[in-house]
Image: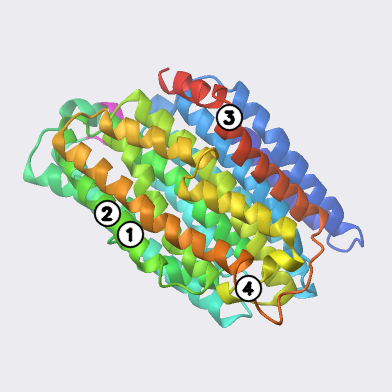
Amino acid sequence: MVPEASLVAILIILFFADFALSKSEKKHPVLRCLTHTLLLLQLVPCVLAEPTEVFGGLYVSTAAANAMKLILTGGTLVVAIMAQPWIERNEVTRRYEGEFYLLLVSTLLGMYVMTSSGHFLMFFLGLEMASVPMACLVAMDKWKKDSAEAGAKYILTATFSSAIMLYGISFIYGACGTLYFDDVATKLSITPMTVAGLVFFFAGLGFKLSLVPFHFWTADTYQGAPTTVTAYLSVVSKGAAAFALCTILMKVFVTMTAQWEMLLYIVIVLSITIANLFAMRQSELKRFMAFSSISQAGYIMLAVIGNSTMGIASLMFYTLVYVAANLAVFAVINVVEQNNGTTERSALAGFYETNPKLSFLMTLALFSLAGIPPFAGMFSKFFVFMAAAEQGSVWAYAVVFIALINTVPSLYYYLLIVKEMYIKKTATPLPAFRSDNATKLALALCTAGIVIFGVWSGIYEWLNSVAAM
């Protein structure tokens, strides 16, 4: 458990550093530098960690899980970097900088436990370790009505989804007499009780992934939360939940593959189609990105249909590319919000005239999300389509075809923002912004990912190799 142990050490160091520096004038730069350095160093144990099993099978770490932890840690590092302009906005925000980093790392620890659990209760513990600090992050702007409302909606939804999931887990325990993944896989049979357990368990995780019809909390929470937290919620949290759902369906519910594949077919089609239709209607950028993330979650789930090594590799690669592209978009939104106080799409009219570099970087990120070649997003979509088609059934081909058709409306609504920045004219465009060094670094890392992941095949080959271990 080297990655988890090192992350716990980081939590302890940050806690005592925040306490020791509470009255120091140098608290903020020291704490910020310490957090970024420790998260960067955290990448090392994720790379070096070996597959292992401890606590009698409660904790099972695989090569694929360690690779996923590496992706999640990288995304968390970028979020911590891009949070600087929001933290420095005023004295109230700066006062809670230490708490922000502690909550961020605590959420990451919960995701680590989720991805390496070998027991349903261990998985549930990790899920709650990730959800509770995330609710605190969503409500971090507690003096703002929207943030408090977003936090309340998130925690209430998380509570209901957790209850539904536990209800499903109790059905599985009643049918199998055990909650260890390996034991359940051998004892599970198709009965009304196990089918109900599968449905309830899937519904609980569907809330975390904001898949349709479990998505109603998403837009309000994304809009009300601080933009940096919204970015974290949309990519890192979603990636961990998608990987956990994928591994549990393939490993635990292998005897019920026909049942959960049909469930996935319905949810994927609904998520992609409905999210695309609603995204076209959004004028507020964070609500727009909320429905975009629902659609992207549907595409991620295509990788699960394949029920193969390629599916796991495709899911990890899609998550990696999605982290880079989505965080780049949110970094630009964050700059606009901190400098102009708005996240309306209409505010971007004529944005290219005054901020050509930010406009260009946002365009690259949007093109990647839409799947336009030669950017990485095109390859990530291609790989999940291939993984789904590998299943070989008529239903799988139909779902892939519908997903392909849905790329057209998704391209349309992403281009609406590009049109706003480059084509729409206004007499009062936003003034030229000078981004701080932290934002420049975050954008540079994300843009490098968008470009490099699209041209360097070694990334996918490595993920495919660890998925096969």
Q: What is the crowding at mark 3: few (fewer than 14 residues within 10 Å), some, or many (at least 20)?
A: few
User: Residue 297 at what x, y percent from top left?
Assistant: 39, 50
Measured in 3D between alpha carbons, the distance from the residue under mark 1 to the one under mark 2, in whole angstroms, is 7 Å
The residue positioned 18% from the left and 34% from the top of the image is 257
* Residue marked by disc 4: 349
* Residue marked by disc 3: 455
Amino acid type, mark 1: Ser
Amino acid type, mark 2: Ala
Which of the 4 image quarters holds residue 216?
bottom left
Q: Are marks 1 and 2 in contact (CB under 8 Å)?
A: yes
Measured in 3D between alpha carbons, the distance from the residue under mark 3 to the one under mark 4, in whole angstroms, is 32 Å
* Residue marked by disc 1: 161
N-terminal of the pair, mark 3 or mark 4, is: 4
N-terminal of the pair, mark 1 or mark 2, is: 1
Instruction: Tell me: 217 left or right of 138.
Output: left
Instruction: Please identify the dominant SS of the magenta region.
Output: loop
Callout in the foreground (4, 2) = 4
User: For the residue labelled by badge 4, is the local secondary structure a helix, a strand or a loop?
Assistant: loop
Amino acid type, mark 3: Val
